[in-house]
Amino acid sequence: MTPSSAPAAGPAGRPLHIGMAGAGLSCAVIARELAEQGHRCTLFEKRPHVAGNCHTERDEKSQVMVHIYGPHIFHTDDDEVWALVNRYMRFMPFVNRVKATARGQVFSLPINLHTINQFFGKTFSPAEAEAFITQEQADTSIADPQSFEEQALRFIGRELYETFFRGYTLKQWEVDPKRLPAAILKRLPVRFNYNDNYFFHKHQGMPENGYTEMVEKMLDHPNIEVKLGTPLAPDALAEFDHVFWSGPVDGFYGYDLGRLPYRTLDFQRSEAEGDVQGCAVMNYCDEAVPFTRITEHKHFSPWETHAASVCYTEFSRSCGEADIPYYPVHLTEGDDLLKAYQARAAAEPGVTFVGRLGTYRYMDMDVTIRAALDTARAFLAKH
Ligand SMILES: Cc1cc2nc3c(=O)[nH]c(=O)nc-3n(C[C@H](O)[C@H](O)[C@H](O)COP(=O)(O)OP(=O)(O)OC[C@H]3O[C@@H](n4cnc5c(N)ncnc54)[C@H](O)[C@@H]3O)c2cc1C
């Protein structure tokens, strides 16, 4: 969903009073852009903190920086976005190196030369591995992959797919990978060298004092007011010249057409002494293991030293009414409900729907910030 309706017209030159639902990255970036141009922004946040799902908090006992709603790693190719986040917080070097437990062994992800050699018991060179995967493993009869499963079979073949992706994907989405769009796998690279950096992006790092302090600094401006623990209701919109809504788009309409499907996550938190798993992220690929991954949060801040540790074991399930919506569910079949809400949102006067919930899209933080910058600038250009 693109930024929708035109801003409410005020007398030319008068600073506007803007209302915002949410104090996550989307609204924080928009608020700062508008505040710097003289507009007054009031952000309503139903949670007791800013930063939305990126919220981080130091564990009192261990002093480990915990990513409360699941781990967040910043990575981007967008130089302007990278400069923006660094304006508010020093980013420390961090490279995401994911491990995977599957069929009784620990492998390196994304699938790379080490994974291929270990899995097939070989000592392939890069060229040999590429020839082996593309000529002997990949299913080249699939010319135009339509689903996640076809895409995986086309890229890496059945053995690697069933070991690393099928069980994990079933647990994550509770949907047969045949019904998931191929686009999901386009994000998971296969490498014929020993590069085990999970991301391809030019910039990667972690905010030294966490995302919440970064967002607090972004919102620290005389034209910005933040009301924590205060939801914004759709019927309060008349108080503002314009509203940016980063809450769920179906929630704005009281779910009157039905609820858009989401996955939610349950985090089983555990504390221990020492180093629990030796890495930040360990995926569990076997279908028989009920969780998808364990994250050990102190390893997301490798420049810090902590004797104790905090881990999250992550379970994925369908999102109920009282749960936090995490991942929108897009299936290969049509998204009629989404289209109906999108059409209404696009025509909504005086409201712009933004962010991951307002536009019903999975967006990494850098994509969220880019979209917010573009939205704010388009809004300002109309004034
Ligand atoms: C499990 C998980 C892991 C992720 N990991 C990464 C990662 O490693 N790297 C990365 O780049 N990105 C990651 N992301 C994506 C990242 O979380 C998003 O890009 C970012 O949170 C989007 O910000 P937002 O402001 O659009 O939404 P949110 O962070 O959801 O913020 C919206 C805020 O609005 C509030 N709100 C909603 N409705 C109302 C209302 N009516 N009134 C008041 N307040 C309201 C909510 O409480 C929330 O705080 C991850 C996402 C998830 C779900």
Image (spheres, helix red, strand yellow):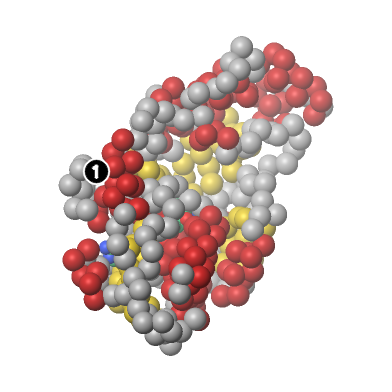
Asked which quadrant contains residue 58, the reply is: bottom left
Q: Nearer the viewer, residue 258 or 135?
A: 258
Q: Nearer the viewer, residue 223 or 189?
A: 223
Q: Is residue 206 above or below residue 159?
A: below
Asked which quadrant contains residue 98, the reply is: top right
How far from the left and from the top, in percent, is residue 116? 68, 26
Q: Which quadrant does ligand 1 occupy? A: bottom left
Q: Is residue 243 above or below residue 252?
A: below
Q: Is residue 285 left or right of residue 127?
A: left
How far from the left and from the top, in percent, is residue 320? 23, 44
Q: Is residue 30 left or right of residue 231?
A: right
Q: Is residue 59 visible?
A: no
Residue most extreme to the bottom: 222
* Callout 1 amino acid: Arg
Q: Is residue 23 above or below residue 14?
A: above
Quadrant of image for the C terminus: bottom left
Residue drawn at (74%, 31%) of the image: 192
Q: Secondary structure at mark 1?
A: loop
10 Å crowding of disc 1: few (<14), some (14-19), many (20+) = some
Q: Nearer the viewer, residue 101 or 200?
A: 200
Q: Is residue 333 above or below residue 371?
A: above
* Residue wearing tag 1: 259
